[in-house]
Structures are given as C-alpha cells and as structure tokens.
C-alpha cells in the first residue's frame, strides 16, 4: 500500500480496536453488522430417504432459484445476534434493518455503536432514502458508526458469526426465501440461547508490533 493508504488503514483499524477495548456497557451496546450473498438452490430429483447411520443422498444436479442477501447483527459481548435474509441488498434494505435493530431489538437506547464495512449503502444517507427526514434523523442520532478500513473486513466480528452460520445452518440446499428465513431464525434462537460471546484479543499494541510494516515511516 502507498503511505497515504497505509495511514488511512491504520487510523481506521485503531479506531475499531479502540471500540473493541471499551468495557462492556449494557446501556451502550457495541453491534457489528455484515452481509452475505446467498444462492438459493432447489433439487432436480428427490433426495433418497435417510437411513439409520447414513446421511441423506442428494443428486449432484441442482436448480438455481435466484439469489438473496443475508444480514447479520451481533453484540459480541452480550452473546446476541439477529439474522435475516432479504431479496436484495439496497440502501432501503439496510435502512429497514437499522430501524428494526434500533426500534425492535434496542428500543429506548439512546446510543448504539455500530461497526461495519464501508460499503456505500452503509451510511446515514440510506436512512433518508427510505424514511421521512424527521424519522431518518431520529434514527441517525441514535447511531455511533465506525467503519472498518478498506481490505480490513477481518476487523468486523460479524464475519465470525457469518462463518459460524454458514457452517452450521447453510451446509445444504435451500430453495426459497421463506425456508431460508425459517432456518436462520432457528439457528439464531439456538445460538442466542447459548449466549455465545466473542472475546476479541487483538489490540492496538498488538497491531503496532505485528503489523508495523503498515504504519507510515516518520521523517
């Protein structure tokens, strides 16, 4: 990376790491969000019935049933997450997910800290594309947004949830959005019941030592 890009990367990285080092405050939750594209797939032939001690047999051929986008929100220190699938990933979809997060999941909270990547729809402007100005501003004022740097998606804890969800919930063909959302809700409920938390160990001091080549050289 050029020195200018390095400086931008480490500045955002250390900002995210500072957020993760904050002590747990149940009244000011730190939420990480991310999205995942998903291909809906159907069977061209009926799978063979399962037998004791054997797995289900499916044909190698499949039918494409379209694509969708899976949104995940997680509060790592509380062991909470919310997952939903939508037909598309546009600014208005993100805005509706943010409203659900604030009004349904965290009603009454004055401030919610939100960590996410810098996709162009991940911005307060998206709220104004979906809601009237007074409502969009009300939602925006409740957010404290922190963007991960370009090429720094590994700093988003929501990626850990997406990886777990992919392994545990999506390792088979699902052909429509309704079935997918039913599976995601079941996975979400089970994982929330277990209050699976994430203990993030990588701190700014570690970054300055292990990633020192990314830090600009001072004259």
Image (cartoon, rainbow, N blue to C red):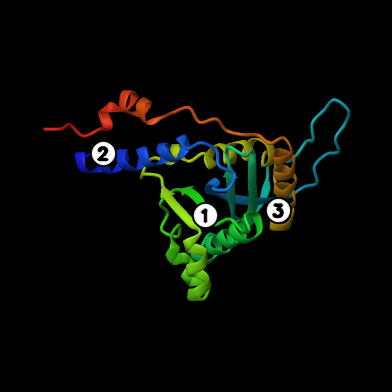
- Where residue 121 appears, as percent x and y from the top left, is 45, 60
Residue 120 or residue 104, whichever sits in front: 104
Q: Residue at x 62, y 39 (%)?
A: 78
Q: Earlier in the sequence, mark 1 or mark 2?
A: 2
Q: Residue furthest top?
A: 209
Task: Identify the disc placed on residue 6.
Answer: 2
| Vertical comparison of 198 with 117: above or below | above
Residues at marks 3 and 2, CA–CA distance in whole angstroms: 40 Å
Query: Which residue position holds label 1?
Result: 111
* Residue plotted at (41% across, 41% down): 16
Instruction: Determine the secondary structure under disc 1.
Output: loop
Disc 2 crowd rating (10 Å Cα; few below 14, some 14-19, many 20+) is some
Whether residue 200 is visible to the viewer of this picture, yes or no, is: yes
Q: Residue 5 in the image: state x and y as whole percent.
A: 25, 43
Label tally = 3
- Please say if 127 is above or below 148: below
Horizontal and vertical percent for residue 102?
59, 58
Circle 2: element type? helix
Q: Identify which residue is drawn at 41% across, 58% down.
A: 120
Disc number lying in front (3 or 2): 2
Q: Which mark is residue 27?
A: none
Q: CA distance from mark 1 to mark 3?
A: 28 Å
3 or 2: tag closer to the N-terminus: 2
Category of crowding for the residue at label 1, using alpha-carbon neighbours closer than 10 angstroms: few (below 14), some (14–19), many (at least 20):
some
Q: Observer-nearest residue: 169 or 203?
A: 203
Tell me the crowding category of disc 3: few under 14, some 14 to 19, or many 20 or more residues within 10 angstroms, Cα based: some
**Residue marked by disc 3:** 181
């Amino acid at each position: 990376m050029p020195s200018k890009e390095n400086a931008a990367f480490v500045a955002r990285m250390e900002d995210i790491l500072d957020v993760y080092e904050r002590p747990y405050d149940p009244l000011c939750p730190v939420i990480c969000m991310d999205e995942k594209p998903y291909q809906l797939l159907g069977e061209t032939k009926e799978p063979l019935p399962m037998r004791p001690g054997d797995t289900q047999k499916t044909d190698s051929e499949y039918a494409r049933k379209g694509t969708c986008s899976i949104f995940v929100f997680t509060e790592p220190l509380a062991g909470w997450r919310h997952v939903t699938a939508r037909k598309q990933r546009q600014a208005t979809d993100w805005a509706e997910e943010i409203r659900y997060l604030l009004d349904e999941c965290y009603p009454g909270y004055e401030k919610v800290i939100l960590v996410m990547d810098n996709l162009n729809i991940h911005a307060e402007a998206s709220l104004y594309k979906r809601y009237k100005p007074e409502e969009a501003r009300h939602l925006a004022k409740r957010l404290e947004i922190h963007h991960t740097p370009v090429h720094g998606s590994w700093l988003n804890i929501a990626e850990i949830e997406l990886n777990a969800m992919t392994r545990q919930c999506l390792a088979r063909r699902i052909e429509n959005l309704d079935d997918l959302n039913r599976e995601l809700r079941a996975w979400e409920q089970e994982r929330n019941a277990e209050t699976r938390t994430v203990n993030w160990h990588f701190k700014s001091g570690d970054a300055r030592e292990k990633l020192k080549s990314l830090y600009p050289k001072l004259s």
